[in-house]
Image: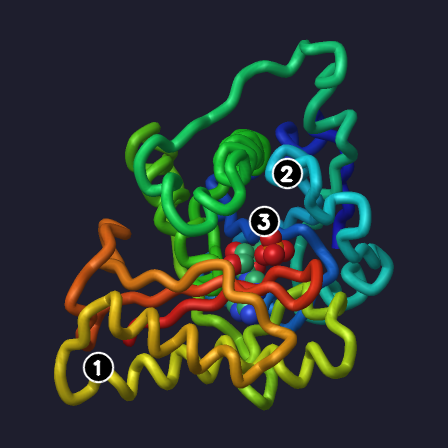
Amino acid sequence: MQIVSSVVAMQRLAKNWRRAGTRVGFVPTMGYLHAGHLSLVKRARQATGRAGKVVVSIYVNPTQFGPHEDLAKYPRDLKRDLKLLREVGADTVFTPSDGEMYPGQTEGYFSTYVVEGNLSQSMEGASRRTHFRGVTTVVAKLFNLVLPDVAVFGQKDFQQVAIIKRMVADLNFPVKIIVAPTLRERDGLAMSSRNKYLAAEQRAQAVILYHALQAASAAVRTKPVTAARLRSDLKQFITAAPLARLDYVEFFDPETLVPVTPVKCGSQMALAVFFGQTRLIDNARL
Ligand code: AMP
């Protein structure tokens, strides 16, 4: 497994692959890998075949964190990540530094951002104002460095995938986006690098996100329910976890992300819940 940390070296490698007709699969991550990330790497391998190259990037992208968010304390363990990626058969790991990705940012040399203007206004975009601008910018940069044929993203970040797909279509990136299902812990909590922040009691109660998704599915199974009614019932439901503080719960069309009411089978639900400073997200098709 090859480890590349300079943008020039990454792009040179990618150009060589392209010239040789090698199919490239790409999985962008922020590291501190869990089984959910590794399932994306396996999916990329399926898409590229044994003759193809699977590239995983590990980069905690500063531009997608707000000024009071967890950039500085975001969990990192490169040694462990590399071991896991070697085991799962990744070919190349791209681990750039901030200086490589955003040279001269503090001096104002870096000043071009990719901004999606519609899907990024609600939910995560409303709670985290500059988040998606950072995501689209870094993913566009990574696509230009890795030159992938396919890129795999997790359904766990549902809104992110919708925005990336829109960016790829709007800006004509020659990349096929594959969406992989959310991997969960045994009790149903979606795997996330941020689960590490949770104290034991918070961790025990964090399963409330999954239970809320299940409760909403059950509620709409027999007949549609107005969004206001379902939201109010779920707010009540989530108080069963006293350490939980609901940020948002939304019901929307899975394609357009436009809010729906009444909510019915096939509607998408997403929610964000704080446990102390830790903010967890989850979503499902009801
Ligand atoms: P992150 O390292 O959090 O930026 O995530 C990198 C990629 O892994 C994104 O495409 C996520 O959607 C995906 N991912 C995160 N958690 C999971 C999970 N539990 N199951 C599947 N994919 C995931």
Q: Nearer the viewer, residue 94 or 240?
A: 240
Kind of element beneath mark 3? strand
Residue at label 2? 66
Q: Is residue 16 visible?
A: no
Residue 215: % across, % down: 36, 85
Mark 2–mark 1 Cα distance, whole angstroms, equals: 35 Å
Residue in the image at 59% along x and 89% along y = 186
Question: In the displayed structure, does residue 203 sit left or right of residue 178?
Answer: right
Quarter of the image where one finds residue 235? bottom left
Residue 26: % across, % down: 54, 50
Residue in the image at 66% along x and 59% along y = 90
Q: In the displayed structure, would residue 17 be above or below residue 214?
A: above
Camera-side mark, 1 or 3: 1
Ranked by sequence position, the earlier of labels 2 and 1 is: 2
Residue in the image at 48% along x and 71% along y = 182
Please state which amino acid type lies under the numbered disc 3.
Pro
Residue 216: % across, % down: 32, 80
Camera-side mark, 3 or 2: 2
Kind of element beneath mark 2? loop
Residue at label 3? 28
Mark 3–mark 2 Cα distance, whole angstroms, equals: 20 Å
Please state which amino acid type lies under the numbered disc 2.
Gly
Please state which amino acid type lies under the numbered disc 1.
Val
Q: Nearer the viewer, residue 81 or 137?
A: 137
Ranked by sequence position, the earlier of labels 1 and 3 is: 3
Query: Is the residue indicated by label 3 positioned so its CB lies within 8 Å of ligand 1?
Result: yes
Mark 1–mark 3 Cα distance, whole angstroms, equals: 35 Å
Quarter of the image where one finds residue 7? top right
Residue 10: % across, % down: 67, 34
Q: Is residue 261 visible?
A: yes
Residue 206 has which mark?
A: none
Residue at label 1? 220
